[in-house]
Amino acid sequence: MTTATVRAPRFSRAGRRLGGEDVPVPQPGPGEVLVRIGACRICLSDVHMIDGSIDCPLEEVTPGHEPAGTIAQVGSRVPYWQPGRRVVIAPGRACGACPHCGDAQDLGG
């Protein structure tokens, strides 16, 4: 069985290098969604991580934490979001109280 992969930018903390590599397509957990990214850019916090002015806590990072795309799959405990819905991903956690978050309590948030 072959694992599906996607090309992604990857930053290596040890080598301070930004390059591209094929990474496995993740499967969403029970309270998660998988988003097919349509657009994503490197933001200033990514630039600071790459230039070393912000410490990178992980050995490897996929930069670009503010993408937009379409939901491809939903986990088993995701009651509100559905495949095909266009989304913008903001860094942070769902508040669980507003309509934008859906019912985050059911998501384990």
Image: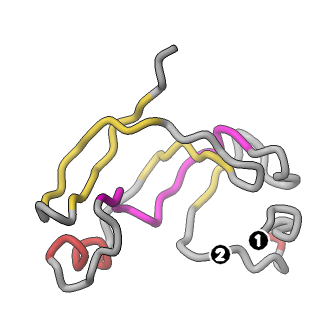
Note whether 36 is above or below 54 in the view shown. above
Q: Is residue 61 magenta?
A: yes
Residue drawn at the location 29% of the way across and 62% of the way down:
59
- 54 left or right of 6 in image: left
Front residue (pair 37, 31): 31
Q: Secondary structure at mark 2?
A: loop
* Main secondary structure type of the part rendered in magenta: strand
Front residue (pair 83, 27): 27
Residue 37 is situated, as x and y percent measured from the top left of the image, at 49, 46
Q: Which residues are magenta?
A: 60-74
Quarter of the picture holding the C terminus: bottom right
- Amino acid type at circle 1 is Gly
Residue drawn at the location 84% of the way across and 51% of the way down:
77
Identify the disc placed on residue 49.
none
Residue drawn at the location 52% of the way across and 56% of the way down:
68
User: Which residue position holds label 2?
Assistant: 93
- 31 left or right of 37 in image: right
Q: Secondary structure at mark 1?
A: loop
* Labels 1 and 2 touching (C-beta < 8 A): yes
- Amino acid type at circle 2 is Arg
Q: Residue furthest top?
A: 1
Residue drawn at the location 28% of the way across and 50% of the way down:
9
User: Which residue position holds label 1?
Assistant: 109
Note whether 73 is above or below 64 in the view shown. above
